Each structure stands twice: as C-alpha cells, then as structure tokens.
Image: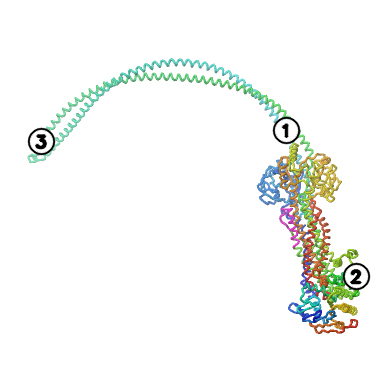
Amino acid sequence: MGTKASRKNFYMEIRKSPGRFLSIFFIVALGVAFFSGIRSSEPSMRITGDAYFDGANLMDIQVMSTLGITEDDIDAIEKVDGVELAEGSYSSDFLCNTEDKQYVFHVMSLTDEVNEVSVSEGRLPEKTGECLMDADMGYEVGDKIVLTSGTEDPLEDTLKTDTYTVVGLGSSPCYVSIERGSTTIGSGSVSAFMMVPEETFALDVYTEAYVKVEGASDLTAYTDEYDSLVSGVMARIEEITGERGEIRKNEILEDAQEEIDEGRKELEEGRAEADQELADALAQITDGENQLADAKAQLESGRQQLEAGKEKLISSQNEIDSAKSQYESGLSQWKAGQAEYESGLAEYNASKPAAEEEIRQGEGKLQASRQELDKNWEEYQSFLDYIAQMDTTVSDAEQKVQELTAELSRYEEDSEAYKECAAKLEKAKTKLAELQGTRDTAKSQAEGMLEGLNAGETAYRAGVQELEAAKKQLSDGAAQLEAAKSTLDATRAQLDSAWNQIQSGQKQIDDGWAEINAQEKNLESGEAQIAENEAKLADARKEYESGKAEAEQELADGEQELLDAEEQLADVEDPEWYIYDRSNLVEYDGYGENADRMRAIGRVFPVLFFLVAALISLTSMTRMVEEQRIEIGTMKALGYDRFAIAAKYLGYALLATVGGSIVGVLIGEKILPFIIIYAYGILYQHISEILVPYAWSYAIQASAAALACTMLATLFACYKELGEQPASLMRPPAPKIGKRVFLEHVTFIWKRLSFTWKSTVRNLMRYKKRFFMTIFGIGGCMALMVVGFGLRDSIYEIADIQYEEIQTYDGSAYLQENVTEEDRENLDTFMKEDSDIERYMDAYMMNVTLEHGSDEHDAYLTILADPDKSEEYFSFHDRISKEEYRLSDHGAIISEKTAKLLNAEVGDTIRLKDEENGSHELTIEHICENYMGHYIYMTPSYYEEVTGAEPEYNCILFQTDESFSKEEMEEAGEKIVARDEVLSVSYMHDIEKQLDDMLGSLNLVIVVLIVSAGMLAFVVLYNLNTINITERQRELATLKVLGFYDREVAEYVYRENILLTLIGALVGVGLGKVLHLFIIETVEVDAAMFGRIINLPSYIYSLAFTVAFSLIVNGVMFFKLRKIDMVESLKSIE
Amino acid sequence: MDGFVTLRNVKKIYQMGEVQIMAAAGIDFEIQRGEFAVVVGPSGAGKTTVLNILGGMDTATEGEVLVDGEDIAKFSQKQLTAYRRDDIGFVFQFYNLVPNLTALENVELALQICKDPMDAQTVMEEVGLGDRVANFPAQLSGGEQQRVSIARALAKNPKLLLCDEPTGALDYNTGKSILKLLQDTCREKGMTVILITHNSAIAPMADRVIHIKNGKVEKIIENEHPVPVETIEW
C-alpha cells in the first residue's frame, strides 16, 4: 500500500463493505473469544483455587504416623530442607446421634498457621466445650452437639468433653467441595467437620502434622511446578521418617517399660497393701471378739451391782418407815400444845374488853384533869404577863420620876416651871408608889397560884402511872400468848421438814427402783447386742476369707497383665509414617480434575468453533478477491506489483482479524471463565473470589491461529487471481462448468425430480466449497447444541435411571450397631405387620476398598439376604444389551464405572481390601449398568466363601406401597426410624434430589454452550447466505427477468439452504454424538457415570434451533433478494 | 388507432443526490403487432432504459406504456413480474444462462413458470440446437449460448420479444445468424420483436426503425420493404 491512492482505496473498501468487514471481525471475535475463553477457564480455575488455598494458608503436606507425632518430630520436620513451617494438629472422627439420623463428624483442632478456617457466622471456639461447625451442616450458632465414640474406645480417651456448643460456623480449605470424605465409623462417610481448640483433645501426641513448603505459595496449585516442589520436600521428609520412627518407637518402648515397671511396683505395693489390709482386718476381727468378751463381763458385774442396789433400797425403805412413825408421835404432841394455847387465847380475849374499858375510863379522867391543869397554867402565865407589864409600867414611872427629877434640877427653884415640875414630880411619885403597891400584891398572888398548880400536877402524874400499869398487865398477857404461839409454830415447821425428808427419801427409793428396772432392760439389750455382734463377727471373718482369696486373684491377674504387657512390648512394630500431599484432602484433586475437564472441553469445543470461524473468513476473503477481479486486473495493468495488490486484501483481513481477536480475547477471557467457575461454584461454595486473569498464551494462540487462518485464506484467494494475466482478469471469469452430479446417473430418481430440484442438486454440487462450509458450519453448531442438550440428558437422567430403573427400592433403614437377635426379630415382625411396607429385605452395606492390579477404588459392598428376590429391589443388567443378570454364588456383580476405574472385566479377580484380616479375592461375574456411586453386589454365601465370615446385616431395604406419594413414603419411614433398633432411614428420592442439585451446576455451562452454538449458527448461516446471494446475483436477476416472483426466487435459494441445513443437521447429529461421548467421558466425575445416551427431544430441540436460526437468516435474506436490481446486475459483467 | 406497443411521453429520471439525470426525456412511439422493430442510438441515448421499461424491469417516472392495450407503467411490482413472466421474452447481450443447467434445462427454467409454454425440445430444434440440448452453457459457443437464450425467450410464447444488443458479444457471422433467427422468428411466428442496437447498419432489416438521441425519439422510419439479414453487411 505504497501510494496514497491505494491507501485511500483500502479505507474506502472497508467503509463500502462494512458488512463483510464486520462479519469477519465478529466471527473472529467469536472464535477467539470462545477458544481463549474456554481454554483459559482451566488456568483461571486453578488460579482461583490456588488463591483460595493460599489465602487460607492451606498446608502442602500432611504427615501422619501410626504412633502419632511428637513435638520433637515436628521440630525435626521443620528442619527438613524446604519446609517453611510444620504444625501439629489433632483430629478424630466421632458419631453424633440426632433424633432420626446418625452423623459422623470429623473433629479437628484449630491450627495457628495453616489451614485457616474462615468464619461465616459467630466466632472461633476459644475454650473446651465450644466448637466451630461446618457451615454446610445446617447447625446454628448456639446449638448443642453431643458426640459419642464410634469405636470401642471411650470418647474421653480422645476428647475432654462430649458436649459442645456451636459458637461459630465456617468453612475449611481442607474441604473445597460439599464432600466430607470417608471414615471407618458409622455410615462410613463423614457428614461434617468440627473445629475445636487444641486443648479440647486429651491426646499426648499429635495425630498429624501440617507442613507448608517454602515457595509453594508462589506457585499455582495443580501445576507440575507445584507438584514437583512439594514432592521433593515430601521425599526429604520421607528420609527422616526412619530415624524419627526409631526414636518414637524407643520412646514408646521406654514409656511402656516405665509403665510396666511402675505397674510392677504398683502391684507389689498393692500386694503389700492388700496383705496389710488383710492383717488389719484380722486384727479388727480379733479385737472385736475381745471387746465382746469384755462386754459380757461388764454385763455380769452390772447384774451384780443391780442386785446390791436392790438390797440397799429395801433397807432404806425400813429406815423411812421408822422415821415416819416418829413423825406421827411428834405431830400428836404438837396438836396437844396447840389446844392449850388456844384455850389461853380464849381466856385473854374474854378479860381483855373489861380491862380495856377500865383503862379507857382512867384515861378519860386523866384527860379532864389535864385540861384543867393546862387552863390553870395558862391563867398563871397570863398573870405572869400582867406582872411583867406592871414591871414595865413601874419602870416607866420610875423613868418619869427620874426624868422629872432631872428636869427639876435644871429649873430654878421656885420658878413657875419648877413648881409645876415639882408638882408633877410629886404626882408621879405618888403614882409610882401606887403602882409599886399593886405590883407587889399581884406578885404574891402569883406565888399562890403557882403552888396550887404544882399540887395539881403531882396528882395528875400519879393517875398516869396507874393507867400505865394497867396497860402493861394487858400487854404482858398478849405477849405470853404470842410466845406460846411461836413455839408451836416452830415445832410445826420441824414436823413439816421431817415429813418432807421422808417424802424425798421415799422418792429416792422409787427412783432407785425405776433405775434398777431400766438397768435391767439395758442389760437385756446389751445381751442382744452381744449376740448380734457375735453374728457380725462371724460374717466379717467370712468376708475376710473371701477378700483374701479375691486379693490373691487380683494380684495374680495383675501379674498376668504385666506379663502380657511385656510380651506386647516385644511385639511393638516400627511406626509407619504416611506423608500425603494435598491430594489426600477430600475433593482437592476433584477441583483439579474439574479444571482438567474444562481443558478437555476446551480442546474440543473451541477448536470446532474456530474451524468454522476460519472457514467463514476464508470464504469471505475469497469472495472479496473474486469480486474485485477486475480491480486486481486493472491494478496489475497499471503496473502495481503483486504484493502491493495483495496487501490491500491482506491488510483488510489483518485489520478485521486483529480487531476481532482483541475484542474476542478481552471479552471471552473474562466472561467465559467467570461463568464457568461461577457454575462450578455451586460445587465449591467456599471458594468465594473468582479470579479470571488474562491467559496471554491462549490469547496469543487464538489470535495467532485466527490471523494465520485469515491471512492464509486471503493469500490463497489472492494467489489464484494474481497469477493470471491482467487481460484475462478484466474478462469475466470462465464460468464454472456445469457438471452432471452422481444422482443424474440414478435415472429413476433423477427423472422424478422436478426441474427446480435438479437445479438445486446441481447447484449444491457445483459450489463444493460453499457446500462443505455450510454443512460444516451448520453441522458444527448443530453438534454443539446436541452436545449441550445431550450433556443435560446424560447428567439429569442419571438420577432418574439410577433410582427408577436400577435401584428401585424406596429407602433403607440402618440398624443400631448393637442390635441383638431379639431386636432383630421384633423389627422383623414390625416390618411384616406394617401395612405401609410392601416388601423389605435385610442387607449388609459397607464401604469397602477394591483393588485390581495397581488400581484401587472404594465401593459399597452390598449383600442381599435373599438374592433370589433381588430383582424386586435392584435391576442388574447390561447397559447396552439390557441382558438381565442374577446374583449367584460364583461371583460378584460390580457396577460399570467401578469396573472401568479398576480396569477390571468380567471374569477378572479383584481383591477386597481388609486391613485386619488381609485382602480377600473375588471374581467378577457380571458388570451392571449403574450411574451413581460404586457398588459390588454379592450373595451371602459367596461373601462367606470369600471372606470366611458371615455377613452381619446392618440395614433393611424397603419398598412402600407403589401408590404412595413422597410424603406418605416419608411417613412410613418415620415410623420405622421411631423404633429403637433403627439408627437412621434414608430415602432414595433424597439422594436423587441431592444429585440434581449437585449436577445443576453444569446447567450454566450447558447454557453457555447452547447460546454460543446458536450465535455461531447464526453468524455462519448469515455469512454463507450473504455470500451465496452476492455470488449468484446475476443468476437470480435473470430469474427475476424471466418473471419469477420474489417468492419463487427465494424458494430457488431457500431450497438449497434448506437442503444444506438438513444435511448439516444430519452431520451435526453424528458429530454431536461423537463429541458428546468424548466430553461425557472427560467431564465425568469418579463418583458417577453419566448417561451415554442423548434423548430424542434433545436432537429435536437442536434441530429446531438450527432450523429456526436458518429461518431467521433466510427471512433476512428475503429482503436482500428483493433488493436485487435486475437492470444493474444484468447490465454488464463485473 | 393505437399500436400494439405504444409509448407516450415516457420519462425516466434518476435522482442521483442533487443531480437529476434524465435517461428518457419523453419518448413517444408506436409499434404494430408482428413488427420487427429496431431501436438505435448512440451509447447513453436511453435505448436500454426504454427496453427495460418495456420489459417491465424498470418503471417509467412519467408517461404511458401501453402493451396490448394495458398500461404497464401503472403496474405494481407483482403485476410487472406477472407481465414479465407471461408476456415478455428477453434476450440479453451476455446470454445470462444459468451455468449449471443444461441448455434444455435453461429453457425449461422459463417454461415451468408460464401459462402456455411451448415444448422445450421443439424450440431447441427450431433454434438449431436439437443436438446440443444436454450440454451445459460452458460447453457451448457464444452463438450457441445466445440461441439457447433466444430459445428460452421464445419457449414462453411471449407477446413481445425484447433483445438487448443480442449480437454485442458475438462475432460478425454468428451475430448475423442470430439476427436471422430473430427475423425468421418474427416473420414465421408473427412475433413482435424489439431489438436494441447501437449498430444502425442493421436498421434496413427492420419494419420500423426508431432513432433515439438524448433521451428522445429523433425519428421513426418505417421500412416498407425490409431486407433479409443476409443481404446486409456492415
């Protein structure tokens, strides 16, 4: 494209024909998107998985040992080259019984640095009794879980407690899918895991060690680099196991020896102790006997004392009696005294009133004389007062005299005053003399009065004395009486105290008697006691004898045990170390296998897609070059060289392809892996983050392939044209020579064909490239759809076929482990009488491991108690020939997939692995159709022949009434499970549903396939039709000129299209079938066999879709046909 | 009286963006039944346009096109298709045979859709290809292919045979023989034939010669005595 003009021409070409450009662009985009998208799903799955594992610090290596792993072992592992860290952990399986089901839980201890649990609800357990429960199990935070041991060893050997509270729910990277692995207890399969703190375990040594490999997290899981890094470290760990095993063994031996020694010591101690105890017991017995003898002697002396007491009591009674009679005489004396006193008292009382009257009279007289005396005294007194007054008056008068005398002295004699005064003095002196006279008379009167008074006083005193004497007489009498009275009273008191003494004496005697009686009773009970104790002693002696015998036995046993232990010690084997990589984790490999399966799908589907895309580009480009024949000729004629001319077309293709590739890679590598991983997410719920990085290698592969295809196609198309001379290029191409087709030689058909059909057939044959392309395109998309629908069939059908055609019973009831014969019979009767149960059969079902050569696989060993009736529960038949098989005593029937995985065929001998008793060999008699799970069926007698043991039937297969609905069936089942003998009941329809859920994840993948196929079909048909029409525009215009109606012209084209579509569809059916088989075989999981058959409706749907796409495209074409301009297309030859 | 074919003021205008191109600027002529008419004119004069309109492959923008009394200018697409199918035989410059049908089958292709067809084999014999019926177009020479083309047109028993430069891609002698075949057909079967050519030399063989120039009829010449083709040389 050297020149400006040619560049312009190039761009104009694209603008002029956007349809062609876009069709190449889109078909390349589609092809590249599908190719790189599906292919990069595989690495994206690995990367997604790896990110999840690294995020949760999933261990790389798991180390286990038959003798457990010690701290030292872990240190030793950590020192191994390439080990980043090692951490010990505990785990063990336990049973959990709920109302109607028994589950097995895998209990693990929490680890710090590896296998991080992600908590979805609640928190991590922190102390014993708490646990984190598997989020898929349906428990809720706060629920209680009670575990029981599934083995003979008690749970307490391993765990500190059996009751746990769920404190959190979560998931562990050890379980990527919903599978939880198998176990040796219970139903054989683990239902859920449980995380507990490390200290919950009561074990001395770790059960396993988790190892992280240095640099492993930088590598992607499931890749060879990762595997080789890990296996190198595993090999190095393996190297130290011998040494570690030796150490561990010695440790155990030492411990055991120590224990034995200790045991021996204990035994000796026990022996001594027992001897001591026995001696003590004997001593006690003798002691008891002595005590008894003492007691007897005591009893005797007691009896004697009692007798003495009795005698004493009798003498005391006599004394009391004499005291009583003494008292009686005293009492009568006192009574006489009393009478005397009373008569004295009466006398006194009689004389007393008269005396008293006399006294009173005397008193009255005395009173009166007294009063008189007192009056006289008063008179005297007042007279005295008068005298005193007189004295005063006298003294006053003397005073006055003196005064007047004095006064007179002062006055001149004879003076008037003097005279007057002297008169006065004189008067006063007279008066004084008068007064002195009166007073002296009065004084003598007073002395007379005093004398009279003193005489009266003396008389009165004599009267008083007389009266006092009388009074004294009276009171003396009373005092005498009083004295007599008090003497009597004293006597009385004496008597009374004597009486009291007598009474108390009597009481003492009575008490004495009572005591004696009590003592007698005591003595009697003492005697009884002694008798009893004697019996007891006899027993004790007997006991002692037996105890002695027992102790001797025990000691002997202990001795034996010690000897056994010593013997066992000699038998201790070297510990076996097991070193696993992550593939030992449940379903870890499954995820990788799913990625591999995606790769398998990625190998087939996109290639097909891509081929179609390449073919489309080839036709488009060829067509383009052919169309521009004249232009090429002109350019050549103008002197452009070949490359310059080809560059236009190459550039055109390049641009469309590169553009399409980029768009395809960008979209396809993001969307397709996302959808696919999302779909698988249903299986791997806990892988939360989907990583879809661009896988550049696939992008480059796809783009390079697309580029190569289109460029080669363009070159190829150009090459032909460029080789010709310019002149011939300017002329119309030599028309293709019409050829007779093979069918024309089959004249009887050819003749019958209408003219238009003949033309159609010839047309088809003429454009061979277009013919094959269309067939391939339509066939391809038909095949893709057939595969898509077929996958659905294969996957969805299996549940139906498995549980409706192969295992036809409704459910199975698992028995308790410890059922007795009696329980069994009871249950048998119950089942017989239960009207809901149409029929039932005992069976033995156990998960076993089968081996054939180096192949090994688990299967359910199923032994039917009554093989003759097996067809009522199972249908054993060949998948293809449908030939029915019967169980016989000559061999086992094995399920198809199991046989395939074991690489075994009919007549081969396989081994039934039995770790305890060695493997048993058995012969495969038939291989039967089976889709879900792995089974090996045997008759009881063949089982016995193979293993030498009789089967212990552990479950009952039952069939309810045919007309029962699901609910009724479950009701019948509930009745069975309600019985004590039954552990759990499982229904086939439950499994069916579970299965459907699980397989639903593939649905989305299938939808992707169908949609992609549809898109492909559409693009292919549209392209081919467009090319077809433009190529034949002239021919079609001619038809129009000839007067063909639009419909007839369309029919002329459609006839070919319909024929091509049908042929393509037919090819698609074949191709689809082959592809389907291939994909089914690669997609299949180990646990199941998918159906190999595609159902008719799937073909019909695919065909319908293909035809529908074809119709839509043809519908669009109709308008294109109508637009063909007769005039323009006939004007000249292009 | 109107002719068998009458064009009155037929205009065909192509709108090419802003520019109007008038391919036919009002053409008027009449052709009687059974006539051999030749339309001549230089390239781009509008003669093909006229033929296309007459053949029902194109519609007139304006004017009347009466064929056997019917104005096909007013026909719908469907009526036009029916008209092409039943009334018109078309012979192309480049034959336009369907390459993967034998000569006979190419004739049959036309026959199977029309009401009153002739026998294909007979027609093939009439055009002188009775022994080449089983050959594919690619196995035939140009003249032979054009004969097949004419046979295909004739077999429909059309009212009107339209020929667009039927000799344009043929050498002189072959062209002559084709023209002879057409003239003979006209004379013997009373078929109305309209032939377009830029070669005015062949005009003497026609009953009527219509000269077209710049989208208009320049002149119409009626030959009282048309000459046989053999006598014409150019």
From the image, tell me which residue sits under label 2.
Answer: B134
Instruction: Please tell me which residue is depicted at 89% across the width and 67% down the height of the picture.
Output: A740
Between marks 3 and 2, how big is the CA–CA gap?
235 Å
How would you rate the neighbour count of disc 1 (Cα within 10 Å): few for under 14, some for 14-19, many for 20 or more?
Answer: many
From the image, tell me which residue sits under label 1.
Answer: A267
| Residue that lies at the very extreme toward the right in this rendered image | B131
* Amino acid type indicated by mark 3: Lys
Q: Viewer-proximal residue, A982 or A506?
A: A982
* Amino acid type indicated by mark 1: Leu
Q: Viewer-proximal residue, A29 or A914?
A: A29
Give me the chain letter of mark 3.
A
Residue A580 visible in image: yes
Q: Secondary structure at mark 3?
A: helix
Which comes sooner in the sequence, label 3 or label 1? Answer: 1
Residue A663 at what x, y percent from top left? Answer: 75, 65
Q: Which quarter of the figure has residue A846?
A: top right
Q: Is residue A238 above or below residue A336?
A: below
Q: Secondary structure at mark 1?
A: helix
From the image, tell me which residue sits under label 3.
Answer: A427
Q: In front: mark 3 or mark 1?
A: 1
- Write the start and end of the magenta stretch as one range: A667-691
Give me the chain letter of mark 1.
A
Image quarter where the C terminus of chain A lies is bottom right
